[in-house]
Image (cartoon, rainbow, N blue to C red):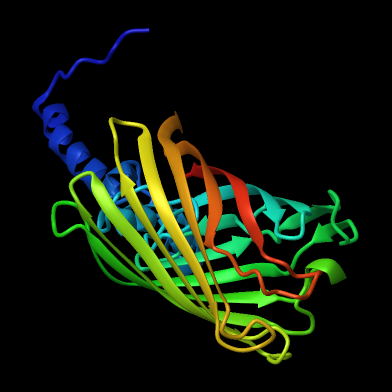
């Protein structure tokens, strides 16, 4: 098959006309060159801008922002830190009571700690599981859960990291429910505990403390109110060592123990923060707690105070 050659001026004149016709066709909707038309824009994904989804997508960003604006001390063993922390914590006590009994306390009323905003923390605690042994005392053995400090809410009021002042001030509000077995409960009283906590540091040395007041909703003549205070002095040694010395005091202001007092001192040490994976780190520590102002006048054999204890604390931060 042979290609036709342009043999005349008329044939040559038809070429510009063909180009004009082709251009007109391409300019029509759906024409041969419609590919030059603008592409339709994709519909925005509503899920990306959904407030709830966005809140959880940026959870760790808020936690990092909250922790960057506060001191980076280690959480003490027997003093609730004023810092906002995000971790799972497990504590265990071996307590020796004044009447000769022994109590093994598992979980220590600790649990999951979360930072939902840049100035708040919520603690969702596991009730302590306790095992009371007779060990020569007249108290009957008992095993079961104690009352649950299920929720504590922290509101940070002031804070500055090490470069900007190295201090913090925080308010707590804790709630204890009468869910324990008969041997370990204040039933039927709920207990609300407002607390103020603070801390200040100088280089590798810091002091953290709390003061709170227990307010039972019922049975005040029996359970009573009490003033709780704690103070921990702490030093950061090398990379992973945090030796500490703590004071914990309870002053009963009403109830069966009114006007009585007990003060504990607790030398201890925390180790950490050990990198596990990305944000996940592991800390652990041990302390020995002993009463230096024991309450020898408690007559209720079912609720004696302990006079010394070993404490183990483990935390997984994230």
Q: Tell how many labels.
A: 0
Asked whether residue 211 is in view, the answer is yes
Q: Nearer the viewer, residue 273 or 188?
A: 188
Question: What residue sits 61% from the left and 76% below the top?
Answer: 175
Q: Is residue 305 left or right of residue 280?
A: right
Classify the position of the N terminus by image quarter.
top left
Question: What residue sits 73% from the left and 90% below the top?
Answer: 219
Q: Nearer the viewer, residue 105 or 89?
A: 105
Where residue 40 sits, quadrant-wise, is bottom left
Question: What residue sits 17% from the left and 35% below the top?
Answer: 14
Residue 129 vs 4, above or below: the answer is below
**Residue lying farthest to the left in this orientation:** 9
Q: Is residue 48 left or right of residue 133?
A: left
Q: Nearer the viewer, residue 30 or 276?
A: 276
Q: Is residue 118 left or right of residue 19?
A: right
**Residue lying farthest to the front in this orientation:** 296
Where residue 230 sits, quadrant-wise, is bottom left
- The spot of residue 296 in percent (x, y) is 65, 69
- The spot of residue 303 in percent (x, y) is 75, 70
Q: Nearer the viewer, residue 244 or 195?
A: 244
Question: What residue sits 38% from the left and 46% below the top?
Answer: 244
- The spot of residue 295 in percent (x, y) is 61, 69
Where residue 190 sits, quadrant-wise, is bottom right
**Residue lying farthest to the top in this orientation:** 1
Residue 211 vs 53, above or below: the answer is below
Q: Is residue 46 left or right of residue 187?
A: left
Asked whether residue 80 is in view, the answer is no
- The spot of residue 115 in percent (x, y) is 45, 60
């Amino acid at each position: 098959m042979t290609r036709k050659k342009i043999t005349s001026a008329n044939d040559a004149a038809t070429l510009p006309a063909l180009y004009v016709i082709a251009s007109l066709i391409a300019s029509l909707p759906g024409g041969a060159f419609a590919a030059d038309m603008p592409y339709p824009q994709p519909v925005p994904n509503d899920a990306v801008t959904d407030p709830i989804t966005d809140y959880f997508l940026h959870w760790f960003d808020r936690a990092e922002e909250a922790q960057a604006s506060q001191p980076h001390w280690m959480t003490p063993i027997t003093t609730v830190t004023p810092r906002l922390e995000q971790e799972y914590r497990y504590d265990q006590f071996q307590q020796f009571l004044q009447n000769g009994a022994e109590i093994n306390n598992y979980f220590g009323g600790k649990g999951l700690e979360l930072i939902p905003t840049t100035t708040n923390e919520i603690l969702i605690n596991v009730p302590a599981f306790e095992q009371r042994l007779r060990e020569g005392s007249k108290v009957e053995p008992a095993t079961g859960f104690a009352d649950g400090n299920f929720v504590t809410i922290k509101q940070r009021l002031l804070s500055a990291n090490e470069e900007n002042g190295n201090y913090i001030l925080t308010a707590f509000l804790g709630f204890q429910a009468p869910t324990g077995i008969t041997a370990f409960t204040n039933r039927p009283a709920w207990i609300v505990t407002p607390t103020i906590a603070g801390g200040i540091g100088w280089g590798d040395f810091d002091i953290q403390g709390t003061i709170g007041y227990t307010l039972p909703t019922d049975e005040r003549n029996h359970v009573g109110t009490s003033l709780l205070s704690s103070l921990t002095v702490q030093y950061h040694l090398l990379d992973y060592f945090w030796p500490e010395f703590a004071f914990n005091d309870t002053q009963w202001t009403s109830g069966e123990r009114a006007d009585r007092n007990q003060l504990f001192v607790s030398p201890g040490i925390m180790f950490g923060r050990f990198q596990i994976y990305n944000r996940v780190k592991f800390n652990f520590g041990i302390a020995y707690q002993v009463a230096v102002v024991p309450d020898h006048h408690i007559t209720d054999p079912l609720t004696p105070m302990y006079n010394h204890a070993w404490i183990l604390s483990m935390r997984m931060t994230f």
